[in-house]
Image (cartoon, grey):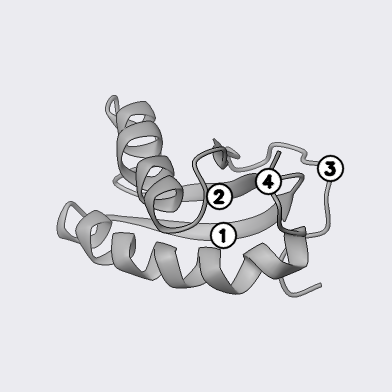
Amino acid sequence: MIPFSDDELLPVVEKSLEKIKPMLALDGGGLTLLGIKGGRVFVQLQGACQGCASSGQTLKYGIERQLRIDIHPELEVVNILPGMEYEFEAVGE
């Protein structure tokens, strides 16, 4: 059980993702935070990361690992493909 609300997680998740973005950019990729619900962090991989054969590894062993180290070991990251429906309020709405 994650001891933080989704609203409490938002600023620390954003800060942690800022560490990862430069590494993704080196390979021509990117990342957008879409929202957080129930300890699940919803992102959308962009650029070269979108559709890359290694995107699952990037998600699990790069992004999720960093969030678990920085914030909480039970956080989960979910990649939302473009055009895919998702059920939560997006960041900034």
Question: Could you say which quadrant of the image residue 6 lies in?
Answer: bottom right
- Which residue matches tag 2? 43
Describe the element under mark 3 as helix, strand or loop.
Answer: loop
- Residue ID at (24%, 61%): 25
User: Can you say which quadrant of the picture contains the N terminus?
Assistant: top right
Which of marks 1 and 2 precedes in the sequence? 1
Q: Earlier in the sequence, mark 4 or mark 3?
A: 4
Q: Which residue is mark 3?
A: 87
Q: Amino acid at mark 3?
A: Glu
Mark 2 secondary-structure assignment: strand
- Can you name the residue that lies furthest to the left here? 26
Q: Earlier in the sequence, mark 3 or mark 2?
A: 2
Relative to 88, residue 70 above or below = below
Tell me, yes or no, whether the two marked residues, 2 and 1, touch with CB atoms within 8 Å.
Answer: yes
Residue 33, numbered label: 1
Residue assigned mark 4? 2
> Mark 3 touching mark 1, by CB under 8 A?
no
Among the 4 quarters of the image, the one containing residue 51: top left
Residue 54 position in % (x across, y down):
27, 28
Side of 76 relative to 88 (left or right): left
How many other residues sit within 10 Å of disc 1, few (<14), some (14-19) or many (≥20)? some
Quick one: SS at disc 4? loop
Crowding around mark 4 (Cα neighbors within 10 Å: few <14, some 14 to 19, many 20+) is: few
Q: Amino acid at mark 1?
A: Leu
13 relative to 49 in the view: left or right:
right
- The three-letter code of the residue at mark 4 reads Ile
Seen at 60% across and 40% down, the residue is 80
